[in-house]
Amino acid sequence: MVPDFLIQFKEFISQPWPWWVAGPMIALIMFILLFFGKEFGISANLRIMCAADGAGEFSDFFKFDWQSQGWNLMVALGAMFGGYIASHYFLGGSDVAHVSAATVESLKQLGLNYEPGNVPLVPEFYSWESLFTLRGLIIIVGGGFLVGFGARYAGGCTSGHAISGLSALQLPSLIAVIGFFIGGLVMTHLIFPILF
Amino acid sequence: MKISRYIFVGILLGVTLYKAEAVSWFRIYEMFHFQSFHMYGIIFSAIIAGMGIVQLIKRTHMKSTEGQEITFHPKDRSVPRYLIGGIIFGLGWALAGVCPGPMFILMGSGYTVFVVFLGAAMAGTFAYGLLRTKLPH
């Protein structure tokens, strides 16, 4: 018999989380890692994985003590578990992105037609079949490549620069985040109309 | 024990970003259209809470569990690498609708095609490693 308060707790956290819960929670995660003597930066895992696969033979960039960074791989592994747990146990019966009515309208211009309140969390083009379409291939392989290349070139991604860097008032992180938004706006407003 | 605590931190991150819909391509699309405060709320509230945390750590000279004082390494001063690298990352972030955190989270939630995305991201990182000395920093 599961106690009532546990069932209520499960129902409570199965609702979509508002921004004012998620933001401080991310800051708490950053604090926990700092408290453990580490730094919050997820994209560093890509470099660690390259190094672990022997990329050090090709570039000194991958010659570092990656074994000492194993903790970060555990954060990534935990994030995978977290995704599994949230999607299998705390969905609250729906798997939708509660985007604004304006967004539902502008998605129509891309040929993505959804009823308001029925936009999926993950778009249909994230499937194996979609790899055999040009658009799916560009999004999955092209998007992945740009994210991996850009994150390392800039020295960090959303967690390392936007959260950790800006929290510590680092000017380079502000420049990087400005870059994130220039790139994001160009993609969304100038390239999407061609791609879709 | 030491390893399991990082897995726990990751679980916290995964559940949070999933439940706040930050893993959604549509939320990123919405953000770059300035059609909702949601993503900005997440980022701004994380930064504001984070600033308080950093100040607290600095003022109290807080020690980590490793016994050393927690320090913040100033990043190298430069513009090109952060701006150009940032723009490239931003292009990918908007295109794919995911950054590295959500990539792992969605892979775990059953979208196995993100294995390909991870491979492409590693290829991108590898390409940077090869080209690094030829790129402006």
Image (cartoon, coloured by chain):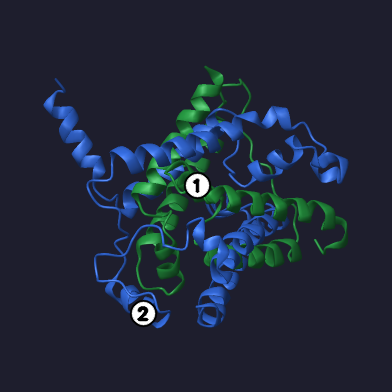
Q: Nearer the viewer, mark 1 or mark 2?
A: 1
Horizontally, residue B60 falls left or right of residue A146, namely left
Q: Which chain gets the blue colouring?
A: A
Mark 1 Cα shell of 10 Å, populated few (<14), some (14-19), many (≥20): some
Q: Is residue B6 above or below residue B134?
A: above
Q: x and y percent of residue B116 in the render?
A: 60, 51
Q: Is residue A12 left or right of residue B116?
A: left
Foreground pick, A183 / B104:
B104
Compared to residue A63, the image places residue B120 above or below, namely: below
Q: Position of residue B51 (x, y in %)?
A: 49, 48
Judged from the image, the secondary structure of the residue bearing numbered disc 1 is loop
What's the amino acid at mark 2? Lys
Identify the residue under disc 1: B112
Looking at this view, name the residue that lies furthest to the top.
B1
The image quadrant where one finds the N terminus of chain A is top left
Quarter of the rendering containing residue A27: top left
Residue at image point 35% right, 41% down? A86
